[in-house]
Image (cartoon, rainbow, N blue to C red):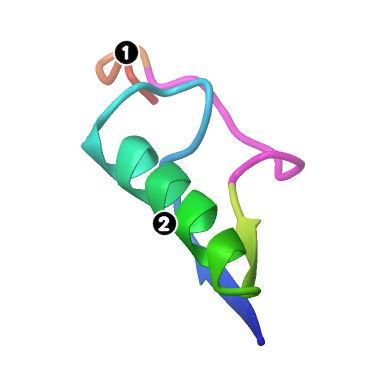
Amino acid sequence: MRVLIATDAWHPQVNGVVRTLTSLANAAKVLDVEIDFLTPDGFPSWPLPTYPGL
């Protein structure tokens, strides 16, 4: 089975969402489930000075 998960939180961020998705991917491997992540990497973005984490 293959699963696609779209998320705006991914590495190099360190937060609960990233940790949970990483754990989910590791657990899915044991069940022979392939998970792909659609993340902001590869898409254009612009800095938002009032939101340092973005």
Q: Amino acid at mark 1?
A: Pro
Q: Nearer the viewer, residue 10 or 21?
A: 21
| Residue 52 disc label | 1
Give the side of residue 17 with respect to residue 47, left or right. left
Question: Could you say where residue 27 lies in the image, as x and y percent from the top left?
Answer: 46, 58
Mark toward the viewer: 1 or 2:
2
The magenta segment is 40-48
Tag 1, which secondary structure? loop
Question: Could you say where residue 20 lies in the image, as x and y percent from the top left?
Answer: 31, 46
Instruction: Using the image, determine if residue 2 lies above or below residue 29.
Output: below
- Farthest residue to the right: give it: 42
Q: Assign the magenta stretch its main secondary structure.
A: loop
Q: Nearer the viewer, residue 31 or 12?
A: 31
Q: Name which quarter of the figure residue 48 lies in.
A: top left
Tag 2, which secondary structure? helix
Q: Is residue 52 in the magenta section?
A: no
At x 52%, y 68%, the residue is: 5
At x 46%, y 43%, the residue is: 22
* Residue holding disc 2: 24
Instruction: Using the image, determine if residue 37 lies above or below residue 45.
Output: below
The CA distance from mark 1 to mark 2 is: 27 Å
Instruction: Using the image, determine if residue 41 lies above or below residue 37.
Output: above
